[in-house]
Structures are given as C-alpha cells and as structure tokens.
Amino acid sequence: MHETPGIAICCTTHSLGGIELNVLRLAAWMTARGHRCCIIGAQGSPLIRKAAADGIPVMEIPARSRYNVYGEARKLAAALRRDRCETLVLNINRDLLLGVLTKRATGSGIALVHTQHMQFGHPKTDFIHRWQHRQLDAWISPLPSLASQTGTMTAVPAEKIHLIPFGIELAPLLNPPSAAAARETLALPADAFIAGVVGRLDRGKGQEYLIRAAAALQERGKNIHVLLIGEETLGENQGYAQELHRLAESLGMKDRVHFRGFIGEVGSGYAAMDVFALTSLSETYGMVTIEAMACGRPVIATESGGTPDLIGSSGAAVLVPPADVPALTAAIERVMDDPDFAASLGAAGRAYVAEHFSHELQCERIEQLIERIRR
C-alpha cells in the first residue's frame, strides 16, 4: 500500500489566536480523516508548542530575516520531499515568499495553497505580490465577500479562488449543558438575564460597549449581568482589561460584570448566556458567532467586517452598527422582552450552522480541492 501524500500547514506567527487555532483544528481534523499532516511554525512559538502537546508533528523554522529566507526555503523543500508532503498550505501573507521559494526549490513538486483569514487593507497588486500570487495553485476564501475582495485586490486568477468556510465541531455545541448547570459552574447568578461574549479583551473587540449597554438597561430597572470570557491580548500592553474593570465600577456595574478568562469548555460559557453579543469593531470571520449559534443562543452582532456575510439571510442574528451603544441597548432589550423572538433567533442560528459550518464539510471540500490541484 502506498503511503498517503502529506499535507504541511504553515503559520509562522508568534501568537495563539484565531488563525493559529484554525490551523491546529484543521491539522487535527485532517489527521483524524487519515491524512498525514504536520504544522510548520516559528521555533518555540505558542503554535508549535501547542501542536507538539497535541501530538501533531511539527517542523520549526528559526527566527528569520530577509537575508536567509532562501536558505530556509531550500531546507524546508528538502524536509517536505523527505516526508512526502505534496501540499503546502499557507495562512499569513508574510509566509508567501517562503512558500513560493519552497515550491520552486522542489521543482514545483508541491501544490501551494493559501488560506485567507483577514480582509485586505489595500490592494496587493505590486510586482512582488503579483509574482507570488501567480505561483499559487489555489486560494481559499472562507466568505463570499473575501473571495470577491481577493478577485479585485490581487492578481490571483479567478479560477484559483475557492470558497470554503471555516467549520467547527458541532457535536459538543449542539448539546450544551443546561443554563442552570453552566451558571453554577461559572459562579453566575441563576435569576439574572446574562448578555455575554467570548473573545480577547481587546479594544478592537469592543467589550466596553456591551458594558455600557448593560448599564443603560440596569438604569431602566432591568436585572442584567455581563459575562466576558477571554484573556487580554498578550504582548500588546493595551491595559484594556483594567479599563473594562474601571468602566464597570464607574457605571455601578462592578458586581454585574463577570470576567472569566479562558475556559476550556466554551460550551458552558454560551449555555450560561441569554444572548450572545459580538461587539467587535470589525470581525473578519467570527468563529465565536458560529459557536454561539450552534449552541442555540440568540445573537446580536456588529454590522461590520465579514459578519453580515457570515450571517447571510439566515435570520439568525440582529445586526447593529459598531460602537453604537443605543442600538446595542435596544437590541438587547428586544431580546429580553420578547422570549419568542429570542427563541426564533436561537433556532434559526442552530439550523443555519448545522447546514453550512460543520468541520466535516470544510474537510471534504479541502480534500476535493487538493485532489483536483494534484492532478
């Protein structure tokens, strides 16, 4: 029996956020489906440490500069040939040159795929980007709007752009714990209305607007609490977590805003919420929004970035302008005051996610793509 050609997934960041978690999940899922996968990352990075701890094979690249990327590409090409990895999947723009040089060092012996995780801030049509993009065998965009943006802001040929949404494992989220059990686990009040969000404590995530909206509702006599699940962004010294604590205290919400940091069983966090409120100023692809919908939570989200595209015409969420406290307040109040409306949002979201965002569907589409470009 011939050994299955391997898939190498490259991401040389030094963080462990949404992009890196997508990389880890994809490697684990594809491995479970019988593929040989490895993760290529920066030496000693959180991604590499987490992958190794999870039993995923890794290739480490030393911290590099523009002066040795050619040498690193030759070394990586040799490693890929040795391990019979015939597909290299890139995930960030700065790895494009490494990927292209690696492909050329193998004599085009690998298929080169780029997965888009972010929106473009400006066109990538200069000579270097045009040359790099032309070397790709495929470009994966997770949303129609991102695929369209790629078509207009890069030189990637239209026939090489493929729409494959990022998926989630549905089973753990379709059967979350009861609200009572989740609130007991997280030490939350049993009788309050809880509006919550999952995500880094970061100015771009806009948790301050949720606190302000809840404070406005408290002034109207509503028994509302806020649940914030997530840690402060590492390495950026924003001090945003302290700002949120001070804001809650200044608004008389100190005992009503609950900071719970990172939790392993995120389903308990969603189950404890009466509404999930995504307050990001701009979110390219809100995995937490998909998770909340899978748990049957009514969703309120900012009408920016990729979120409107993610929700589509599902009827699974209320969209409000970013940083608009009155609009957010009104949306939360509507969910509070209309249980039937809240239930309809939750049911629509659960059905929508089950149809479009399973990890099995993502893996199947990637397998089909790899088979097509390897021919």
Image (cartoon, helix red, strand yellow):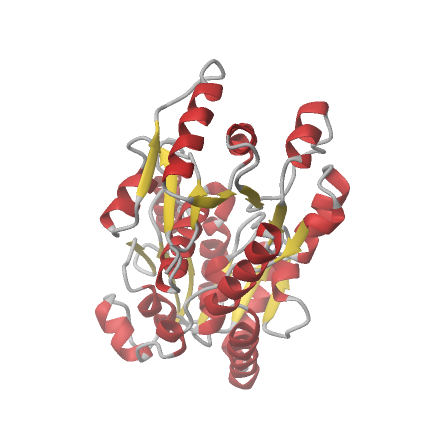
Residue 15 makes an appearance in the image:
no
Name the spot of residue 271 as percent of width and height, x first.
36, 73
Task: Tell me which residue sits at (37%, 23%) in the image.
Answer: 63
Name the spot of residue 49 as percent of width and height, x first.
27, 41
Horizontally, residue 161 falls left or right of residue 358, namely: right
Q: Name the outermost residue toward the front.
A: 1
Height in image: 229 above or below 217?
A: above
Task: Tally the numbered discs.
Answer: 0
Residue 84 makes an appearance in the image:
yes
- Report the front residue among 86 and 323: 86
Q: Name the outermost residue toward the top.
A: 67
Task: Tell me which residue sits at (49%, 48%) in the image.
Answer: 205
Height in image: 204 above or below 236?
A: below
Task: Tell me which residue sits at (61%, 51%) in the image.
Answer: 373
Q: Residue 25 falls in which quadrant of the image?
A: bottom left
- Report the front residue among 26 and 291: 26
Q: Quadrant of the N terminus?
A: bottom left
Height in image: 107 above or below 183?
A: above
Horizontally, residue 2 falls left or right of residue 127, namely: left
Name the spot of residue 35 as percent of width and height, x first.
40, 57
Name the spot of residue 282 as percent of width and height, x first.
58, 48
